[in-house]
Image (cartoon, helix red, strand yellow):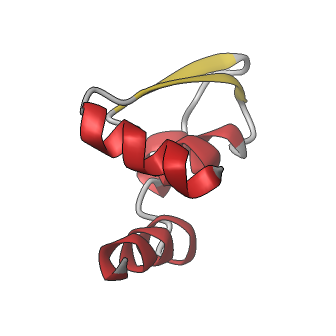
Amino acid sequence: MRWEWSNLRDTFLGEQYKWLIQDLKPNTTALDFGAAMADSTIYLSRAKNVTKVIAYETNNEHYKSSVIRTL
């Protein structure tokens, strides 16, 4: 679980994706391939010009563990 907290810290407090969202055009649809615990999905969904986020996790084990944790 330690890596999860560091991912959240880096994504939200460290704003590691800030470079990605700063020049987006209005009504952007963001794609998150490898969504895992959805931290980047949530970060992208809160961006000013993003109106839709499509998230897909390619690793079945990551998907299963994320779904189990949310139940």
Residue at 27 percent across and 26 percent down: it is: 58
Using residue 36 as the reference point, say whether residue 25 is left or right of it: right
Horizontal and vertical percent for residue 30? Answer: 53, 24
Give the residue at x 27% y 41%: 61
Q: Position of residue 13 (x, y in %)?
A: 55, 77
Residue 40 in sight in this render: no
Rendering quarter of residue 64: top left
Is residue 23 among the parts visible in the rendering? yes
Please state if 48 lies on the left or on the right of 12 as rendered.
Answer: right
The residue closer to the viewer here, 21 or 30, is 30
**Quadrant location of the N terminus?**
bottom left
Q: Is residue 10 above or below residue 24?
A: below
Task: Tell me what residue is drawn at x 63 percent, y 19 percent.
Answer: 28
Seen from the viewer's position, the closer of residues 57 and 13 is 57
Q: Looking at this view, is 42 or 70 the one in front?
A: 70
Residue 1 to residue 43: above or below: below
On screen, residue 50 above or below 12: above
Q: Nearer the viewer, residue 25 or 51?
A: 51
